[in-house]
Amino acid sequence: MAEPVVAQKAPYEVEVEEGKKYLWCACGRSDKQPFCDGSHKGTGITPLVFTAEATETVYLCGCKHTHNQPFCDGTHSTL
Ligand code: FES
Ligand code: FES
């Protein structure tokens, strides 16, 4: 399995809608960050599907090295 690449060393601030499903890009290769656009094909990495628990602003990991997928946990500052 390929290693995830760093899309950016900072989270993406996005608005999510309660009950809606999102596909967070785990591989770092998507051109539609922070969401999956299918570019993970061939890497062995698959996107993380999550359902928003509320309509709110969330901070999704852009470095792809978080230990709390899909959310930023501050790990980007150690890369
Ligand atoms: Fe990165 Fe799909 S493009 S997980
Ligand atoms: Fe990945 Fe913060 S952007 S941990």
Image (cartoon, rainbow, N blue to C red):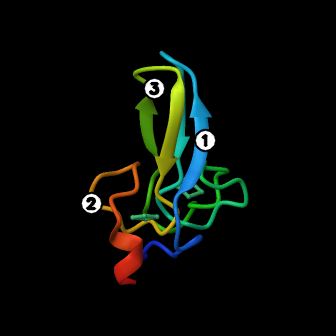
Displayed-image quarter of ligand 2: bottom left
Q: Amino acid at mark 1?
A: Val
Q: Residue furthest top?
A: 19
Residue, far right: 31
Q: What is the x, y in percent for residue 68?
A: 29, 52
**The C terminus - image quarter:** bottom left
Estimate how packed mark 3 is, as few (under 14), some (14 to 19) or many (20 or more) residues with alpha carbons within 10 Å.
some
Q: Is residue 65 above or below residue 69?
A: below
Q: What residue would you read off at disc 2?
A: 67
Among the two numbered marks 1 and 2 on one chain, the one whose residue lies closer to the N terminus: 1
How dense is the environment of label 2, judged by Cα within 10 Å: few (below 14), some, or many (20 and up)? few
Q: Nearer the viewer, residue 39 or 58?
A: 58
Residue holding disc 3: 52
Q: Amino acid at mark 3?
A: Ala
Q: If you read the primary sequence from the N terminus, does the residue marked by circle 1 or circle 3 appear first?
A: 1
Secondary structure at badge 3 equals loop
Front tag of 1 and 3: 1
Residue 14 shows which numbered tag? 1
Q: Residues within 10 Å of mark 1 (few under 14, many from 20)?
A: few
SS label for mark 2 = loop
Q: Residue at x 49, y 48 (%)?
A: 59
Q: Nearer the viewer, mark 1 or mark 2?
A: 1
Q: CA distance from mark 3 to mark 2?
A: 18 Å
- Mark 1 to mark 3: distance in Å? 11 Å
Residue 52, image x, y percentages: 45, 26
